[in-house]
Amino acid sequence: MTPEMAVNICRKAIQTVLMCAAPMLIVALVVGLVVSIFQAATQINEQTMTFVPKIVAVLLTLLIFGPWLIKLVTVFTIGLFETMATL
């Protein structure tokens, strides 16, 4: 295995991880921002109000993007095995 191949595999792995995590992180960020604005406007400072909406939103996002995430990881894994077979 050449160093270029190792770097390429690592780059693809990092790219796959970022693409898998991005939808959940973006939704958690947006929901957290909305809840923070709501808390600042109403001066309600309840701790559970920050966590529960984020958890529900991330779980719904995971359900919506689940098939796409599985396909993404499967394509990466098959490509990795095909690369290993050519060594």
Image (cartoon, grey):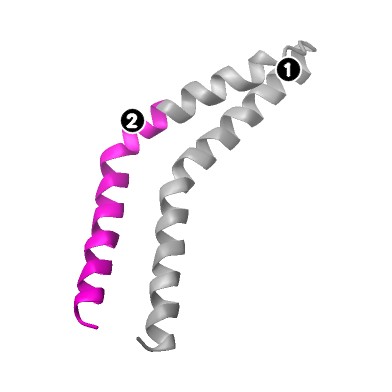
Q: Is residue 7 left or right of residue 85?
A: right
Mark 1 and 2 residues: CB-CB less than 8 Å, in contact? no
**Number of the label disc, if any, that sits on residue 9:** none
Q: How far apart are labels 1 and 2 at the CA level?
A: 27 Å
Task: Residue at 69%, 18% (x, y): give it.
Answer: 38
Q: Earlier in the sequence, mark 1 or mark 2?
A: 1
Q: Which SS type dominates the magenta stretch?
A: helix
Vertical order, 46 against 78 (above or below): above
Residue type of the residue flagged with mark 2: Leu
Vertical order, 51 against 77 (above or below): above
The residue labelled by disc 2 is: 63
Q: Is residue 42 magenta?
A: no
Percent x, y of residue 68: 28, 45
The residue labelled by disc 1 is: 39
Vertical order, 24 against 1 (above or below): above
Q: Is residue 15 left or right of residue 33?
A: left
Residue type of the residue flagged with mark 1: Gln
Q: Which residues are magenta?
A: 60-87
